Image (tube, helix red, strand yellow):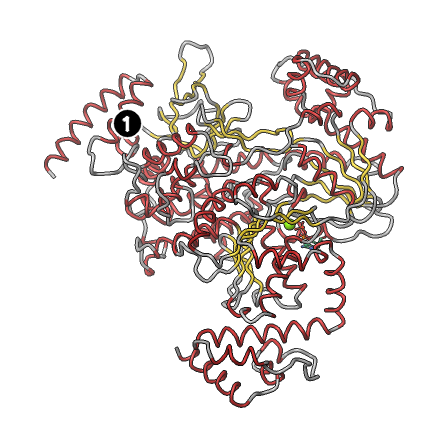
Amino acid sequence: LELQLQVHDLIRAHISKKPTSREILSDNPLLRSSSSNRSLAIKDLDEQQRSLVHNSSANEKILLRKSWILRCQQQEWQESPEGQKMLEYRRSLPAYKERDALLKAISENQVVIVTGETGCGKTTQLPQYILESEVEGTRGALCSIICTQPRRISAMTVSERVAAERGEPLGESVGYKVRLEGTKGRDNRLLFCTTGILLRRLISDRTLRGISHVIVDEIHERGKYEDFLLIVLKELLPRRPELRVILMSATLNAELFSSYFVGAPTIHIRGFTHPVKVHFLEDILEMTGYRLTPQNQIDDYGEENMRRKRKKGMSLGKRKSWIASSVEDTLKAADFNEYSPKTRVSLSLWNPDSIGLNLVEHVLCHIVRKERPGAVLIFMTGWGDIKALKDQLHSNPLLGDPSKALLLACHSLMPIDEQKLIFDRPKDGVRKIILATNIAETSITIDDVVFVVDCGKANESLYDALNNLPCLLPNWISKAAAGQRRGRAGRVQPGECYHLYPRCVYDSLSEFQLPQILRTPLESLCLHIKSLQLGSISEFLSKAPQPPEPLSVQNAVEYLKTVGALDEDENLTVLGRYVSMLPVEPKLGKMLILGAIFNCLDPIMTVVASLSLRDPFVTSFDRRREADTAKAQFAADDCSDHLAFLRAYEGWRDAERQLSGYDYCCRNFLSQQTIRGIDFLRRHFFRSLKNIGLVDHNMESCSLWSHDTHLIRAIICAGSFPSLCSVMFMPQKAKKSVMLRTMEDGHVLLGLNSVNFPASEIPYPWLVFNEKVKITAVVLRDSTAVSDSVLLLYGGRISRGEEDGHLKMLDGYLDFFMEPNLADTYVFLKEELDELIQKK
Ligand code: CDP
Ligand code: MG
């Protein structure tokens, strides 16, 4: 109140004295420190502004004043030499030519779709155009623009770039917000945030009060949260007629969206991409003289992999002939340019990774030796590939020589500082080579790329609704994505693209990628629908641009019921409501709440933080074995990945008090960055739990909470249920062997880096796990062994209303696994429990 009155005073003085713009500016600390002393050529208030001031409320006057300051600031910046240079650059971008058309369409329509090649200026320019025009206009004071990004890294780098283009520090008129991080400016006019942040805001502010423009970027990626947001926005538009929605896409699948938002106009920004020469595998083989012999392919498949197979006595022969025949078939099909059903099958099996690394190395040598200068961008499937290729290239005499080649990686898990290196220009005579995942396809633009090498696949999370199983597999990219990759070569001059697959494979690719909503589990999304009170889950999701299968929706709803977040009629339970307010997926939210209730929140926050972030043990390839040993030591005899994470973190916390956290991490094969992330998340969880009233501020000290291993194990069990796997020993076999089974998938395997691998030492008959994913087999990640009694008492629901609820559920599990001993224990415990319940 005090501050508001002070500002109010200033405005009154401003109106009565009609001060010069210089006086207005001198109130702004940022500009006070500016070096320029000349007076600004900004006119005093015009008639229209004066009448606006007279007719505004006190609050609006404050906003108006801020808006004017913003305008003066911009004017000063644009007149400075750096500002002019920047303005020139901005005006050279293709988007600038469409500026007026874009602004006109936005003022006349509630929804506008904007398409244009990557790098044409959609993300950095369009939000600025809107901001500038609003600030120039009389209602500028009230504008608030939100631009959503599917990835954290793009929200952060783009906001930094836009602030720099406006000559301001980040956090003034331009800010960003991603989970756990963000700028705190109250005067933000333009906010870049992840889609998740906007969805969370919708919980407390269902009509997006105060937001004038929502820009949804990169909609061509069809992320599930973006699709979700589109449904919400479509419903919201009639209630907020002044709200403007702008959808931006890199590829030209705009028809789907313009028919979804009936009548929304599409504006295409014509790019200035230079022509790109395309080479497919057959051309590359001819051009470089590379021979695809079966021996070559075996080498390419990875010496390490083969060595491992030989050691285990596995046959290589079958694999060898399979690769040979499928490549041969593929090339034959390329020759004849036709497909038989047989060729189609072999195409879908044919894996470019098996031709892989040697071919990439060969193509790179060809480029470095024979081609003109220019950076090379290589699209690989994931971190594993990138690392393997980088290692291989380092030992190449030409590519491993730092005076000739600069090898860089670009991956979303890399630290930001390292990521920034990819934008720098190398010294003369040094060839910049960037190994990237599909992140460099559209969200990051590297200007000096002239050559693109495309392996044709990307790691894609798929969801198998029938088996209720997420899979992470390298999958063929779409034609649209291949086109994007190719386009990266023609940013600054004519470029060249090497597709490491035959033309016939390209011809058989699908036009666009399957939307994520059709290929991932939907639990968090369903819970979100309920907490936003958007009605029936299946009805809401049926309004998506491409609705998910009813079976996936049903699976997600069933899961939420099992966890206890929804009741039988699909209403949000109290637990569900609390869980939806926590910034983690439903089962981890439930684990946190249980931790608070059962008095072991401190250790449980660590467990949940590491599950929701990632394994803190280093994933580096060369030190894998040592890392696994270190992890096993932390687990001691407890057979729990969760407890290993917990002890690793607690050890670091002690070491950090003596300022030796870094040494501790090096000694124990831990990533200090991840551990710090866990530490940070823990505090974030505590704040969230405090906000919902489950803890209060004087409970943050870790010594207040129990660290009893049995209790922690029980809570992990309660939170993980129904992710349950039975451990059965097979006594009839000579060697002690063990079989792991889950109810839905039958036989499953443990992840290689789990402390429980290979499961032969587990003293309990059950494992609860955090995640399962189908790679080639179904693999369980992060598991903890639990006993019968823990499972009986803590597995299942914790709802008191239906005393029998969880017992019934367990009945099903027990019948399935047919464990006679357990059944006895169960009957005994059930009687005890019944008696207890009756007494109560
Ligand atoms: O969104 P779109 O792909 O259309 O392009 P953008 O991200 O707005 O980028 C426009 C131009 O700004 C690019 O061509 C880059 O040269 C430049 N840019 C940059 O220099 N640094 C960034 N962090 C982002 C963009
Ligand atoms: Mg963009």
Q: Position of residue 498 (x, y in %)?
A: 78, 33
Q: Which of these two is toward me, 329 or 398?
A: 329
Quarter of the image holding residue 569? top left
Quarter of the image that includes the N terminus: bottom left
Residue bearing the label numbered 1: 809
Q: Is residue 725 above or below residue 91?
A: above
Residue found at the very far left of the displayed protein: 839
Residue that lies at the very extreme toward the bottom in this rendered image: 17
Q: Is residue 89 left or right of residue 629?
A: right
Q: Is residue 56 left or right of residue 363?
A: left
Identify which residue, 754 or 88, lies in the foreground: 88
Q: Residue at x 43, y 60 (%)?
A: 209
The spot of residue 272 in percent (x, y) is: 77, 49
The total number of labels drawn is: 1
Residue 665 screen position, x and y as percent: 55, 47
Q: Position of residue 417 (x, y in %)?
A: 65, 53
Name the residue at 45% across, 23% down: 466
Query: Alpha-carbon neighbours of circle 1 within 10 Å: few (<14), some, or many (≥20)?
Result: some
The quadrant of the picture occupied by the C terminus is top left
Q: Specify the quadrant of the image occupied by residue 811.
A: top left
Q: Does the rendering let one see residue 663?
A: no
Amino acid at the residue labelled 1: Met
Q: Secondary structure at mark 1?
A: helix
Image height of 740 relative to 4, above or below: above
**Residue 718 sits above or below residue 123 on the image:** above
